Amino acid sequence: MEEKKGKQPVTILVVYHSQSGNTRRMAEAVARGASEIEGVHVVLKKAFETTEKDLLSCNGLIIGSPEYFGYMAGAVKDLFDRTYEKLRGHKRIFRKPYCVFISAGNDGQGALNHIERICVGYQFRKVQPPVVARGEISEEILRRCEELGKTLAAGCEAGIF
Ligand SMILES: Cc1cc2nc3c(=O)[nH]c(=O)nc-3n(C[C@H](O)[C@H](O)[C@H](O)COP(=O)(O)O)c2cc1C
């Protein structure tokens, strides 16, 4: 008789870049929120250290970037550059749930729009609106980041996303 297997843990990848710590604080809050959900394993990684294997093996991902020169951080773009050709069209990437958080001095739209456009190319599926911090990272922003992580993790764990 076949042995009954336990439910595999759901893995949420929180990938980010940060120079002066603002996006890192947001990433840590996102990871904290996601880890509140039982049965969820959270992987918090810097973009430069993230590989195609991380993107393949997660059940959902949350991408965080500061806005630099009206664009995403070079490190986040580097992750896309390194993995896009290998992963495009891969069945374990298709419609993978994702969401974004941005830290910027202004409205962050440059970084956000470019990330979202590239994610359309991967055929990731946006499941939550972004959190965009303008200027200092407030307690309210951190609360919204925690909520973002928790919502993505809960949705993936429940099989809704
Ligand atoms: C090199 C550089 C370029 C930046 N360019 C922009 C920009 O184009 N628009 C903007 O709103 N903020 C810009 N900023 C401000 C950062 O987005 C903001 O300080 C952010 O919180 C930095 O995040 P970090 O602490 O995670 O590195 C820039 C900052 C740096 C260091």
Image (tube, rainbow, N blue to C red):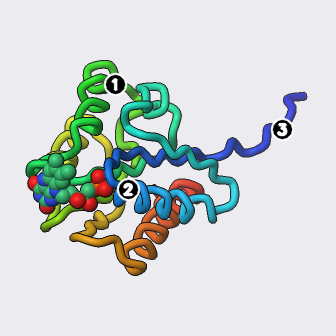
113 vs 122, left or right, is left
* Residue beneath the point at 52% across and 33% down: 57
Quadrant position of the N terminus in the picture: top right
Q: Position of residue 138 (x, y in %)?
A: 36, 77
Q: How many marks?
A: 3
> Farthest bottom residue?
140
| Relative height, residue 37 to residue 44 (above, below) | below
The front one of 127 and 44 is 44
Disc 2 CB within 8 Å of nearest ligand 1 atom: yes
Name the residue that disc number 1 marks. Answer: 87
Quadrant position of the C terminus in the picture: bottom left
Name the residue that disc number 2 marks. Answer: 21
Q: Amino acid at mark 1?
A: Leu
Front label number (1 vs 3): 1
Name the residue that disc number 3 marks. Answer: 4
Quarter holding residue 99: bottom left
* Residue beneath the point at 34% across and 45% down: 17
